Every structure is written in C-alpha cells, then in structure tokens.
Image (cartoon, rainbow, N blue to C red):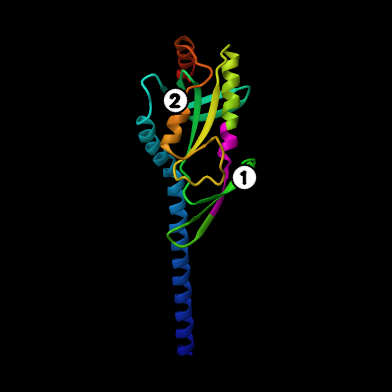
Amino acid sequence: MEYIIGIALFIAIVVIVFKIKSKDEYDSDYNYEQREIKFAGYRGEAIFNNIISNILHSDDILLNNIILDVDGKETEIDYLIINKNGIFIIEIKNYNGKLYGGIDDYEWIKEKVSPGGNVFTKTVRNPIKQTKRQIYILSKYLKNNNIRIWIKGYTYFINHNSPVEDECVISSIHELDQILHEQQDKIYDEKLIHKVTNLLSIL
C-alpha cells in the first residue's frame, strides 16, 4: 500500500512540476511578446528621430504625433514634414519578425519566434492603407480650412521587412532624403507653408 502511495505521490509531483514549467514558459513567452509590443514603438521613434535629424534641411518643418478628427474620422500621424515641395506623411513601423500580406489587404500577418521557441502570429493593420487614410483625412481637414497643397504618404519600415514593394514603402535614409527634397513641378511659397504649419501645430 505504501509502495502504491509513493508511486502516486511521485506521479503527482511530476505532473505539478510539468505544469509549473509549462506555465513559466508560457508566461515568459507571453510577457516577452507584451514587452516587444510595448517598446517596439518607442524604439522605432528613437531610431527614426536619429535618421530624420541627419537629412532635414533648414527649411523643413517637422511635426509629430498629429491627431486629426474630421467628420468623425480620427487618425494619428507619426511624422509630418512640410517644405516647399508639399506635405509628407511618414508612418513608422518597427515590426520584428516576418510579415505576410498584399498591398490591398486590410490586415497583414506578423510572425515571430520567441526566445522560448514558440511561434507568435497576430494580425496587424496594413500600414499602407493606414497611410492612405491619413492622406484623405488630412487633405479634407486642409480643404475645410481653404488650403490646397500636395500631400504624399509613406511607410518607413525600420527593419526593412515590408512584404510588398511599392512607391510608398521606404526602407533607407537615402530614399527618404530623395523623396523629401527632390524638385517637384509645384513649389509652394513661404506664406502658404507658414499658414499650414500654424494650422497643424495647434493640433
């Protein structure tokens, strides 16, 4: 009888240890993923701040974290650069792992392997569609204030892992510099730039 009780106790201990180990691994992976999500945005902004500081010209005006609400449609723009060539919306994405998706998909799949060996997959909004929506809302906001100016939107992938190739996808500082400063057919005067800057700076 004691022998049977001993075996049962041993099995119970093994089961408990296994459950604790499994829970610890799960918690470790879960906490890891949560930390990654929380700090990825901060790291992306810090990296991009360093990038943009190296290419801005003296007449470039940089605004960030612009919140717009037009006719019930709300959006937040990461970075907005105004110069004589127009307005440039730059959406920063610091996704780690591999992305799957198409240019017209509403959502993409992000896949990442944790230090614990587990594969995490989650859906993320297609940032290209997100940027196009930002262009639409900003354009409408400016038109409501009697301002017409050329607006272009881009998504900057910090980790160069965009699943699509498109003219609005940026992955290098040289490419961003060209986009901002390449001579355009339409050049805007300082008066209009000043008006746009004042209007957006109060948001």
- Tell me the element at label 2: helix
Write the residue at 45% across / 33% down.
176
Closest to the observer, 57 or 12 = 57
Q: How many marks?
A: 2
- Tell me the element at label 1: loop
> In terms of sequence position, does the residue under pointer 1 or pointer 2 come before the other?
1
Closest to the observer, 13 or 165 = 165
Write the residue at 61% across / 44% down.
107
Residue stretch rendered in magenta on the structure: 121-131
Closest to the observer, 72 or 145 = 145
**Residue 104 falls in which quadrant of the image?**
top right
Q: Residue 91 location, x and y as percent?
A: 50, 34
**Residue 2 falls in which quadrant of the image?**
bottom left
Q: Residue 144 location, x and y as percent?
A: 60, 14
Q: Mark 1 — residue?
A: 102
Question: Is residue 70 placed above or below 26 in the rendered structure?
Answer: above
State how far apart marks 1 and 2 are (Cα).
29 Å
Amino acid type indicated by mark 2: His
